[in-house]
Amino acid sequence: SYELTQPPSVSVSPGQTARITCSGDALPKKYAYWYQQRSGQAPVLVIFEDSKRPSGIPERFSGSSSGTMATLTISGAQVEDEADYYCYSTDSSGNLWVFGGGTQLTVL
Amino acid sequence: QVQLVESGGGVVQPGGSLRLSCAASGFTFGSYGMHWVRQAPGKGLEWVAFIRNDGTSNYYADSVKGRFTISGDNSRKTLYLQMNSLRAEDTAVYYCAKAGATEGIDNWGQGTLVTVSS
């Protein structure tokens, strides 16, 4: 079965840049999506199609993808960005979707 | 704005069945694919099922294949998840989610809790 691999945790100080990676064999040909989930809340889309930002998401959130790795970057992380972040994509068939294991971002 | 409201969760015994519903509004329901995603207590997100906007193409995670069925009713603007032969490991919050143009999730419901326990 297909897997996406994320680091379990990332920690930065306020104002620093946080980078969360996601690796998967199909990522060179399939889009990555990124979701933020604060404690006790439903997930929220922060990046779609590798690098596009939905309306209402702060400009400090950006995404990129190169080869088998996608990256979510939070430039100038804020305390309110503390959350779990999940990448999401499909396998090579495009019919089976999978989430990465999630990365807990700590900003303190 | 897009709204997705799940219902139908509750407590069910192992081996039992449950049907979840998701009432959709704020977009043309039949024009987009829809996903179900679940999250076990204290765990990460797990994709469960996807139905394409043509309504005839359905896909499932291996963990639920043969037991769960995703379907939609365009006239009622409602998505369903029929869950049979439930197991303790199916205990989770189940989210209904709308797919965007490239089929990734762009909007989420608030979730409904399913507990499988005797």
Image (spheres, coloured by chain):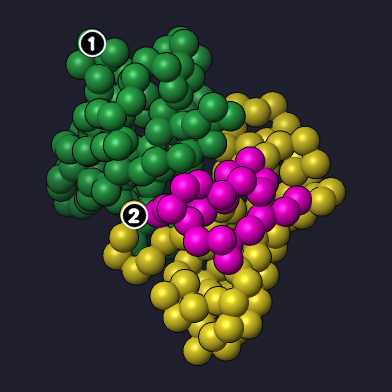
Q: Nearer the viewer, residue B63 or A5?
A: A5
Q: Which image quarter is the N terminus of chain B in? A: top left
**Mark 2 surroundings within 10 Å by alpha-carbon count, few (fewer than 14), some (14 through 19), many (20 or more):** some
Query: Quick check: B32 above or below B37?
Result: above
Question: Residue A81 location, x and y as percent?
Answer: 47, 72
Left or right: residue B71 compared with residue A108:
left
Chain B appears what colour? green
User: At 45% from the left edge and 81% from the top edge, which residue is drawn?
Assistant: A79
Question: Residue B9 location, x and y as percent?
Answer: 18, 42
User: At 75% from the left edge and 51% from the top edge, which residue is drawn?
Assistant: A65
Circle on res. B9: none
Question: In terms of image quadrants, where is residue B29?
Answer: top left
Question: Residue A42 location, x and y as percent?
Answer: 34, 54
Under mark 1, the amino acid is Ser
Say which chain tag 1 marks. B
Task: Evaluate whether residue A31 shows in this view.
Answer: yes
Question: In terms of image quadrants, where is residue B84?
Answer: top left
Left or right: residue B30 compared with residue A18:
left
Query: Quick check: A39 above or below B26?
Result: below
Which range of residues does the magenta coloring cover?
Answer: A43-65
Left or right: residue A93 compared with residue A53:
right
User: At 69% from the left edge and 27% from the top edge, which residue is drawn?
Assistant: A93
Chain A appears what colour? yellow
Tell me the residue that label 1 is attached to: B75
Between the C-alphas of marks 2 and 1, the distance is 27 Å
User: At 34% from the left edge and 19% from the top edge, which residue is drawn?
Assistant: B28
Question: Which residue occupies the extreme right position in the image?
Answer: A67
Tell me the residue that label 2 is attached to: A42
Report the label total: 2
